[in-house]
Image (cartoon, rainbow, N blue to C red):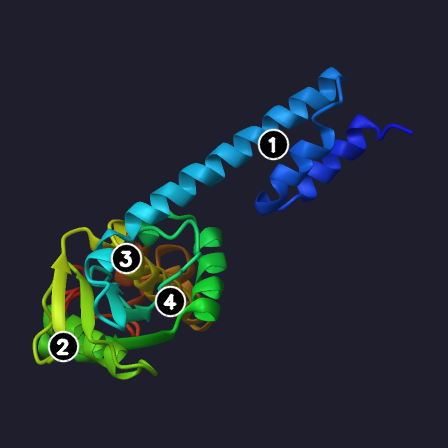
């Protein structure tokens, strides 16, 4: 007995991308127009998957270039611009045959996609290190030096010592490992992209927690960046313990 088109539609919905060729083979002889439409949808999904695989292969250009190094580590930071919260750095060593799709500059991904990728990176990475510098530390030594400190902290926390660092744009002082600064590296290197996702998700989760303690500033939605609502709350309630004093001088009186 033929399967109803509605049932085949549900089957397609439940089919993982990797199993789409099996679905196409199973129904290729079905002449019903409704099934043909579903097969077209399956083919489009498969084409998208192939395009994504090609994009990810292109993202491995630096990893291929430095393939003679045994432990290639990508490094990126998030949170240099906000008025509140820490600056967070991620350091990620991915396996040589990394099969994680959809890694990209974290700013180009939805929050939901970042969360899914964070879990996959944490599961599949050879090593992950997360470093941070507090708002107080940012005020003490300035944001650039605090960023470098967070990056050094992330490197130290790796379970495997890297022998080359692919950095997003910067060269980190006081680090005796070969460094390759790459402009817009989070969109050009899979390792840096993975590090940017880990750093972003870590920091965003912290800001959501801060929002529960201090809901008046809207940290869950603004993540500490200077949105109109955030600045209005800052003027109304004054600074919180996680505001950066050197960043908010224009908005609050001493």
Q: Is tag 4's residue or tag 3's residue first in the polypeptide sequence? A: 4
Mark 4, residues whose alpha carbon is within 10 Å: few (<14), some, or many (≥20)? some
Q: Which residue is mark 1?
A: 42
Q: Residue at x 40, y 55 (%)?
A: 221
Q: Closer to the camera, 74 or 111?
A: 74
Q: Which residue is mark 3?
A: 225
Tell me the tag on residue 95. 4
| Alpha carbon distance from label 2 to label 3 | 33 Å
| Alpha carbon distance from label 1 to label 4 | 30 Å
Q: Which residue is mark 2?
A: 177
In the picture, the quarter occupied by the C terminus is: bottom left
Q: Is residue 20 above or below residue 85?
A: above
Residue 142 picture location, percent across and down: 10, 72
Determine the secondary structure under disc 3: loop
Q: Is tag 1's residue or tag 4's residue first in the polypeptide sequence? A: 1
Q: Residue at x 68, y 21 (%)?
A: 36
Q: Is tag 2's residue or tag 3's residue first in the polypeptide sequence? A: 2
Is label 1 or label 4 in front?
Answer: 4
Determine the secondary structure under disc 1: helix
Q: Is tag 2's residue or tag 4's residue first in the polypeptide sequence? A: 4
Q: Residue furthest right?
A: 1
Q: Is tag 3's residue or tag 1's residue first in the polypeptide sequence? A: 1
In the picture, the quarter occupied by the N terminus is: top right
Q: Residue at x 73, y 39 (%)?
A: 11
- Quadrant in the rendering for residue 158: bottom left
């Amino acid at each position: 007995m033929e399967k109803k088109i509605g049932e085949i539609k549900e089957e397609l919905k439940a089919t993982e991308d990797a199993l789409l060729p099996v679905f196409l083979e199973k129904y290729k002889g079905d002449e019903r127009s409704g099934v043909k439409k579903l097969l077209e949808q399956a083919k489009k999904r498969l084409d998208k998957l192939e395009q994504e695989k090609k994009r990810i292969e292109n993202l491995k250009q630096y990893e291929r270039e430095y393939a003679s190094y045994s432990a290639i580590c990508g490094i990126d930071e998030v949170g240099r611009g906000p008025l509140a919260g820490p600056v967070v750095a991620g350091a990620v060593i991915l396996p040589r045959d990394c099969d994680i799709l959809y890694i990209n500059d974290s700013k180009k991904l939805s929050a939901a996609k970042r969360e899914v990728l964070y879990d996959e990176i944490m599961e599949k990475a050879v090593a992950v290190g997360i470093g941070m510098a507090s708002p107080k530390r940012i005020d003490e030594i300035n944001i650039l030096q605090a960023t470098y400190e967070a990056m050094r902290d992330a490197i130290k926390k790796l379970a495997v010592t890297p022998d080359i660092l692919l950095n997003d744009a910067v060269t980190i002082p006081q680090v005796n490992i070969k460094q390759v600064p790459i402009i817009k590296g989070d969109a050009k290197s899979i390792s840096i992209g993975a590090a940017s996702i880990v750093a972003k998700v870590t920091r965003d989760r912290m800001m959501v927690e801060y929002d529960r303690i201090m809901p008046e500033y809207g940290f869950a939605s603004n993540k500490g960046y200077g949105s109109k609502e955030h600045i209005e709350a800052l003027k109304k309630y004054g600074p919180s313990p996680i505001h950066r004093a050197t960043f908010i001088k224009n908005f609050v009186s001493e």
